[in-house]
Image (tube, grey):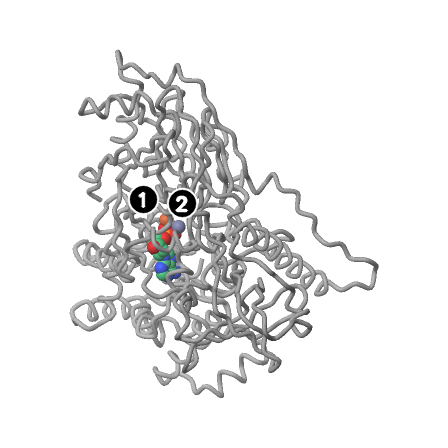
């Protein structure tokens, strides 16, 4: 691979093909790698595209924009640069790299920052070097020192790094979106993995420990799994139907489905009466109160209140609620695209003046469930993030030992002996390419190995405990919600676990007659963005909000991508006994109208990215749920072993 591309990749920067064509002919002769990185860093980007490249060359006085554009428009490619550069150029680069190291405001800062995680972990460093096969600027400096000592030239020092000049056929391959990847020809020979996939970690049930759960009959059913829903995609009626029409049709069906389901929920509320279609409003007696149910297309604060645009299958109308109304505050809770009911009067001016707002919500009281003969417990976890160098592996191993009977107190003994279920609500591995700079924070830089590592760990969960495992946004699965399953090709080792049931996100599990709604929880992000007084630090509040709206991610076009399936599978159709979410990495719980809501936190310590956005996780706390009451029985804290 080209030296420039390789150098950038090893420092965690990417270059697009047009930018490469622009820069390659000038590289080493007119500018150095640290200079380019410094420039990109100042621009706040990890991707060097054509614009960045152009601005960089301009800043160096190498080109005028016009000149370059002309050349680029004619499509003339510059010759790919071979590794056999004049030694002079190399020397220049080294000396400049060294120079910037000494300057406190230089690019070395950027590079050091990026390389910090490698420094903190020797393994990581080895992995990085092995994968990229390219010396980072830091390593170049080291090489230089070696070279100086030995009185050798730079080429030799590259050989130390396994890069023999000219012998390997260099080739840059550009993946989709112009991301350069390593060419086939130069993939290094398969080497032994320098990271552990926990194959040698084995725990067995503690001898003499009585696992009462072994004798308790399992009683579980996956009540709702996205994969069991037969979606009927609309078909083109004839040969002339265009693709675009099908897309429109899918969205139409999606919203129809949402409206229909939410209408049913809202009408269970006895206060929501006298419902009429929006299209029929102009026929009603202007004196009487009526109720409309519709999807809120938009919401706008005015001087005196809130103005909404509300739509049902028969029409669209503007709905106004004044500040003086009792239900005015409920307007804050309405998220875009959620479905709510308004009671009020239709004015012939075409505006509906609302007195009351009804969120779909859940009934005030819950039906009692018959008691269970035996106490059984379920353990809720999420966001394990195996493969991240912030994964609290020691704490997770302690947890596995605990499940196997290595307990500290009598109370723990009683609980462990009766644990029958372990639910894992997504982000089970850290994945790859999930956020910029993630590569530097991976201890297992391969998605297959991450799932293998996770499965090796989970193979230590005692066999009498049934695991339910669903995907999250870091997993190898569809990004848009709902997420049907882990892609089998990647997560094969999970599917092969004997006592695991793979579930979708979301899913509903019935445990001994209690309904557990299991969701990864990206919808929380949208609530935090759209509803006042919500924060990541207390995730259960946004979870309650979603329950009140009876939808796991109501807003289209927000932070969370939603697949326009022909049916809306994110509606919370039946009221569960318990809702578990993860994603925000903070343990938090609350009872709302008889429903127990809990966020099961994480096994990942704070990442660099989370530091930047002020997310403070509470890793390695394990909530244990009493299945009978669907309430919290105990939190076991393993965080003292989370010293990553
Ligand atoms: O999410 C871990 C936490 O990080 C969670 O609170 C959401 C937050 N997060 C994740 N991605 C972003 C972006 N792009 N901006 C802001 N906050 C984010 P996890 O899914 O484990 O990465
Ligand atoms: Fe996560
Ligand atoms: Zn997540």
Categorize mark 1 by other alpha carbons within 10 Å: few (<14), some (14-19), many (20+). many
Separation of disc 2 and disc 1 at Cα?
9 Å
Q: Which mark is residue 476?
A: none
Q: Under 8 Å from ligand 2: the CB of mark 1?
A: yes
Categorize mark 2 by other alpha carbons within 10 Å: few (<14), some (14-19), many (20+). many
Q: Are marks 2 and 1 in contact (CB under 8 Å)?
A: yes
Q: Which residue is mark 1?
A: 602
Q: Nearer the viewer, residue 576 or 128?
A: 576
Q: Secondary structure at mark 1?
A: loop
Classify residue 429 by image quadrant: top left
Is residue 521 something one can see in this rendering?
A: yes
Please state the total of marks drawn on the protein image.
2
Q: Under 8 Å from ligand 2: the CB of mark 2?
A: yes
Is residue 438 something one can see in this rendering?
A: no
**Residue sticking out furthest to the top:** 208
Q: Nearer the viewer, residue 79 or 520?
A: 520
x then y, percent, for residue 110: 26, 66
Q: Which residue is mark 2?
A: 427
Is 51 rendered above or below residue 598?
Answer: below
Residue at 57% of width from left, 53% of height from top?
Answer: 267
Q: Secondary structure at mark 2?
A: loop
x then y, percent, for residue 54: 43, 79
């Amino acid at each position: 691979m080209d030296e420039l591309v390789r150098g950038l990749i090893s420092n965690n920067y990417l270059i697009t093909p047009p930018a490469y064509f622009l820069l390659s002919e000038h590289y080493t002769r007119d500018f150095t790698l640290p200079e380019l990185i410094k420039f990109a860093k100042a621009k706040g980007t990890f991707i060097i595209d054509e614009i960045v490249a152009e601005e960089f060359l301009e800043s160096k006085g190498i080109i005028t924009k016009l000149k370059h554009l002309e050349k680029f428009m004619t499509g003339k490619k510059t010759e790919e640069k071979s590794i056999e550069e004049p030694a002079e150029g190399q020397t220049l680069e080294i000396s400049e790299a060294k120079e910037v190291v000494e300057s406190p405001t230089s690019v070395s800062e950027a590079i050091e920052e990026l390389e910090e995680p490698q420094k903190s972990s020797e393994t990581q460093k080895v992995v990085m070097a092995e994968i990229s096969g390219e010396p980072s600027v830091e390593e170049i400096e080291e090489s230089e020192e070696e070279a100086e000592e030995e009185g050798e030239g730079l080429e030799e020092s590259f050989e130390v790094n396994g890069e023999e000049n000219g012998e390997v056929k260099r080739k840059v391959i550009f993946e989709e979106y112009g991301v350069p990847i390593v060419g086939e020809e130069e993939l290094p020979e398969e080497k032994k993995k320098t990271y552990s996939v926990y194959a040698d970690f084995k725990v067995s049930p503690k001898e003499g420990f009585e696992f009462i759960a072994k004798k308790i009959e399992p009683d579980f059913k996956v009540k709702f799994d996205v994969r069991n829903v037969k979606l009927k995609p609309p078909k083109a009626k004839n040969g002339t139907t265009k693709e675009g029409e099908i897309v429109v049709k899918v969205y139409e069906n999606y919203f129809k489905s949402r409206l229909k389901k939410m209408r049913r929920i809202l009408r269970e509320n006895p206060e929501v009466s006298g419902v009429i279609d929006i299209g029929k409003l102009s026929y009603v007696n202007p004196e009487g109160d009526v109720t409309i149910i519709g999807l809120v297309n938009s919401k706008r604060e005015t001087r005196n209140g809130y103005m909404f645009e509300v739509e049902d299958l028969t029409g669209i109308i503007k709905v106004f609620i004044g500040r003086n109304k009792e239900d005015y505050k409920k307007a804050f809770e309405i998220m875009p695209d959620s479905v709510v009911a308004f009671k009020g009067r239709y004015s012939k001016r075409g505006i509906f003046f609302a007195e009351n707002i009804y969120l779909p919500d859940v009934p005030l009281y819950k039906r009692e469930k018959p008691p269970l003969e035996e106490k059984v417990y379920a353990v809720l976890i999420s966001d394990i993030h195996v493969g991240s160098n912030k994964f609290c592996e020691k704490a997770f191993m302690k947890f596995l030992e605990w499940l196997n009977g290595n307990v500290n107190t009598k109370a723990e003994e009683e609980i462990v002996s009766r644990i029958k279920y372990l639910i894992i609500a997504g982000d089970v591995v850290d994945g790859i390419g999930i956020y910029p700079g993630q590569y530097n924070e991976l201890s297992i830089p391969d998605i297959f190995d991450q799932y293998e590592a996770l499965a090796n760990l989970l193979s230590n969960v005692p066999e009498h405990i049934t695991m339910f495992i669903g995907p999250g946004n870091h997993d190898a699965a569809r990004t848009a919600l709902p997420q049907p399953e882990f892609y089998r090709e990647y997560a094969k080792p999970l599917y092969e676990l004997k006592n695991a049931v793979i579930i979708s996100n979301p899913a509903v599990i019935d445990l001994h007659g209690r309904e557990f709604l299991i969701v990864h929880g990206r919808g929380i992000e949208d609530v935090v963005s759209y509803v006042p007084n919500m924060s990541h630090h207390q995730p259960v509040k946004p979870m309650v909000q979603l329950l009140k709206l009876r939808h796991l991610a109501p807003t289209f076009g927000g932070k969370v991508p939603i697949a326009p399936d022909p049916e809306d599978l994110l509606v919370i159709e039946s009221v569960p006994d318990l809702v578990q979410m993860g994603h925000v990495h903070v343990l938090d719980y609350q009872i709302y109208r008889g429903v127990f809501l809990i966020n099961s936190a994480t096994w990942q310590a704070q990442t660099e990215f989370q530091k930047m956005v002020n997310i403070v996780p509470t890793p390695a706390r394990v909530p244990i749920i009493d299945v009978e009451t669907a309430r919290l029985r105990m939190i076991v804290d393993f965080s003292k072993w989370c010293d990553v």
